[in-house]
Image (cartoon, rainbow, N blue to C red):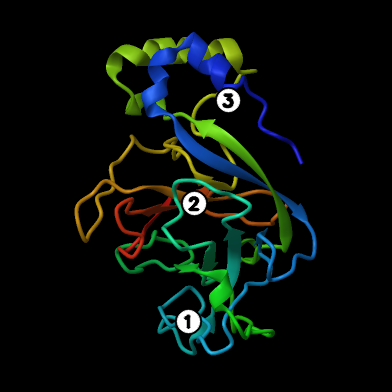
C-alpha cells in the first residue's frame, strides 16, 4: 500500500490559510488483493446482504443485449463499514454502504446514471439489521469488460483532508494555489482532488470545467460521496482509465444519487 505523499494539512494551511473554508474530509481507500469476508470493508468482495432481500438485477439494454434480456445480476463494487471510514457522509443510524453495478456498458441509461458506463446501485444499511445473510449471490449472465468485474481486495483506509480544483476556488486564490502546487508536487498536484478510490473529498475535473450537480428532489448542490478509480490492483477500468463518481444530496441520502464518468 502506498500512502498519499503530500505535506500535512497543517503545513498546507500554514502556506495558504485561505484554503481552510474549502477543506473537505476524505478517506482514500488503498486496495490490496485478498479474500475479504462479508463483514469486512472491501472492493469487489462479498456483501453483507439479507437473505430475504432480492439481489439487484439490470434489465436495461446494453452492448451484449439490445433489449436487456435476460436480466443480469449486478456485481459488488465496494462495501464500506462506518467503523473503517467515519466521516460526514454517513447518515444518522447508518453504518454500512454498499455499491454494486451492472458489468455492461449502457448507451442510454436513466438520467441519474453515466453514459457508456455500468449502471450503479447504492444501498445504505444498518449491519445489525442483517440477521440472515445471503451466502451465494447470483453471478451475472453477461458482462461487457473484465474491467467491470472488480477483483476482491481488502482496503486500508487513509483519512485525509482534500482541497478543490483551482477553478472551484475564488479567483484571487487560484494563482497562489497554482504556486503552492508547483512548490510541493513532484511534477503533479498532490494538494487538490486526491486520486484513487475515495470516500468524500473533492472530484477531479480534468475533462470538463467544474459542474454543480443539483439534487433532482430538492435542488441542493450535491457533494461527492464515492470515487471508483481505474487501477491495476482491483482490475477496474472505467472510461479511458478514468473515474466513476457518485454524487449524493447532503440533506437527504434517500434522494436519488447522480453518477458522472470522468
Up the image or down, 92 lies above or below 108; here it is above
- Residue marked by disc 2: 226
Residue at 30% in and 40% down: 211
Task: Please report whichever mark, 2 or 1, sits nearer to the chain's N-terminal start.
Answer: 1
Q: Position of residue 1 (x, y in %)?
A: 76, 41
The picture places residue 228, in percent across and down from the top left corner, at 55, 52
Drawn side of residue 76 relative to residue 57, left or right: right
Comparing 176 with 67, the one in front is: 176
- Residue positioned 60% across, 83% down in the render: 131
From the viewer's perspective, tell me whether residue 257 is left or right of residue 50.
left
Residue 182: name its quadrant: top right
Q: Which mark is residue 154?
A: none
From this viewpoint, is residue 186 visible? Answer: yes
Q: Which residue is mark 1?
A: 65
The image position of residue 165, as x and y in percent, is 42, 28
Cα gap from disc 2 to disc 1, whole angstroms? 29 Å
What is the spatial separation of the Cα atoms under label 1 and label 3, in whole angstroms?
42 Å
Mark 1 nearby-residue class (10 Å; few <14, some 14–19, many ≥20): some
The quarter of the displayed image where residue 18 is located: top left
- In the image, residue 240 above or below residue 22: below
Q: Nearer the viewer, mark 1 or mark 3?
A: 3
Between circles 2 and 1, the one closer to the viewer is: 2
Amino acid at each position: 500500500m502506498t500512502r498519499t505523499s503530500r505535506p500535512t494539512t497543517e503545513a498546507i494551511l500554514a502556506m495558504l490559510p485561505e484554503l481552510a473554508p474549502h477543506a473537505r474530509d476524505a478517506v482514500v481507500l488503498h486496495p490490496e488483493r485478498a479474500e475479504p469476508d462479508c463483514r469486512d470493508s472491501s472492493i469487489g468482495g462479498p456483501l453483507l446482504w439479507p437473505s430475504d432481500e432480492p439481489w439487484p438485477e439490470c434489465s436495461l439494454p446494453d452492448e451484449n443485449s439490445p433489449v436487456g434480456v435476460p436480466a443480469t445480476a449486478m456485481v459488488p463494487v465496494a462495501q464500506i463499514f462506518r467503523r473503517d471510514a467515519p466521516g460526514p457522509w454517513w447518515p444518522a443510524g447508518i453504518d454500512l454502504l454498499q455499491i454494486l453495478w451492472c458489468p455492461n456498458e449502457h448507451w442510454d441509461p436513466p438520467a441519474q446514471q453515466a453514459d457508456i458506463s455500468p449502471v450503479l446501485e447504492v444501498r445504505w444499511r444498518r449491519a445489525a439489521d442483517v440477521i440472515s445473510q445471503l451466502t451465494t449471490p447470483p453471478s451475472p449472465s453477461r458482462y461487457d469488460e473484465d474491467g467491470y468485474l472488480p477483483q476482491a481486495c481488502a482496503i486500508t483506509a487513509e483519512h485525509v483532508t482534500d482541497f478543490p480544483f483551482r477553478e472551484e476556488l475564488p479567483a484571487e486564490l487560484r494563482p497562489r494555489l497554482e504556486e503552492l502546487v508547483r512548490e510541493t508536487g513532484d511534477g503533479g498536484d498532490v494538494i487538490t482532488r486526491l486520486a484513487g478510490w475515495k470516500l468524500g473529498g473533492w472530484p477531479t475535473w480534468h475533462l470538463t470545467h467544474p459542474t454543480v450537480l443539483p439534487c433532482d428532489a430538492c435542488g441542493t448542490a450535491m457533494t461527492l460521496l464515492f470515487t471508483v478509480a481505474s487501477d491495476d490492483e482491483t482490475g477496474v477500468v472505467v472510461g479511458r482509465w478514468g473515474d466513476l463518481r457518485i454524487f449524493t444530496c447532503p440533506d437527504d441520502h434517500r434522494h436519488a444519487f447522480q453518477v458522472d464518468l470522468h
